[in-house]
Amino acid sequence: MAAPLKQLEATGTVVIADTADFGDIARFQPSEGTTNPTLLFLAAQLSSYSALVDKAIIYARSLPATASTEDRLSAAVDALAVQFGTQIYQLTGRVSTEVDVSLSFDTPGTVAAALRILELYAAEGVARDRVRIKISATWEGIEAARILQRDHGVSCLVTVVFGLAQAVAAAEAGADAIAPYVGRIADWGKLNGSAEEDLGIKTVSRIQNHLRKYGFRTQVMAASFRNVQQVRQLAGVDLLTAAPAILEAVERETKPITAILTADLAKAASDSELPPLTFNGNEAAFRWAFNSDACAVEKSADAMRRFYADTVKLKQLLATKL
């Protein structure tokens, strides 16, 4: 019998290691890797990655003399993300890198930041088509993804997704992928009356089935797993990114892992099971649908605050070297 992770991949799920540790990435041999402010902050504190930090500082110092300290720190963060991302790319063949979360409500700013990140990757020899740009699932972020995909041919991963409205809007915008946070949705559910069922599984299953039923090409990258059972219940999701501890736990499983989510089951679902939902660029309709979902509102804001806090800590760490 195939190893558990191979069984998971056999369901059609592409497995991604949610880590910036090169050793873990090499061990699990995922087909894609990712960075975010939290992973970068943790990794940047390790002496084994000091050379990458030094390169980011050198880049920040090379900016024109008119550049402010804040501009240099922001540039250092982007450069560090690309330094890590380049190493991840060499191990996996594809990498996703996050735009500064403070730009989540700034469409032009997000587009400009994404293009700068791609220029940094190009300087490292990483082709544009091997990079995904991660953008928060705000209305402004989704519009930035639309512009990047349509006008610049940039692959976008819309992240911080906690509800169907965000997923549908991102899919309508043509985003290549979205990342709903299974574990964080489940956590919210436990605190708000969903103790009998895993709200994360329910929500992400609904998102995946909805996009498949209505013919969207956008892939679902399930993220933020708390346990192996969540992985099992989402077997068949397009993409799955999990921390090394979760992937190790999957590898210890003795019961077969079989597909739960399939395109055939999604397409066979009735309209009453998966009602149609469209926005067609209507911002007001999106905002109403989004704000009608308490979990999406609360957890999206919480996730962006957390990423921003880690970005600030990362800048403080880099400032000591700059």
Image: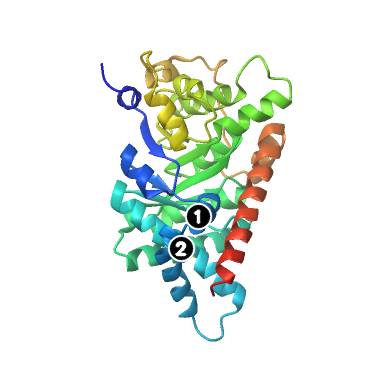
Residue 117: x, y in percent? 44, 63
Residue 288: x, y in percent? 70, 38
Judge whether residue 220 can be spotted in this image.
no
Q: Secondary structure at mark 1?
A: helix
Tell me what residue is drawn at x 58 percent, y 45 percent. Answer: 137
Which disc number belongs to residue 40?
1
In the rendered image of this protein, does residue 321 appear above or below residue 288? below
Among numbered discs 1 and 2, the one appearing first in the sequence: 1
Q: Are marks 1 and 2 in contact (CB under 8 Å)?
A: yes
Type of amino acid at the residue the image marks with label 1: Leu
In the rendered image of this protein, does residue 319 appear above or below residue 47? below
Q: Secondary structure at mark 2?
A: helix
Mark 2 Cα-neighbour bin, 10 Å: few <14, some 14–19, many ≥20 = many
Residue 55: x, y in percent? 41, 70
Type of amino acid at the residue the image marks with label 2: Leu
Residue 4: x, y in percent? 34, 22
Tell me what residue is drawn at x 52 percent, y 58 percent. Answer: 45
Relative side of 225 to 176, left or right: right
Nearer to the camera, 310 or 22: 22
Q: Which quadrant, please, contains the C terminus?
A: bottom right
Q: Residue furthest front?
A: 47
Tell me what residue is drawn at x 57 percent, y 31 percent. Answer: 183
Which disc number belongs to residue 80?
2
Q: Which quadrant, please, contains the N terminus?
A: top left
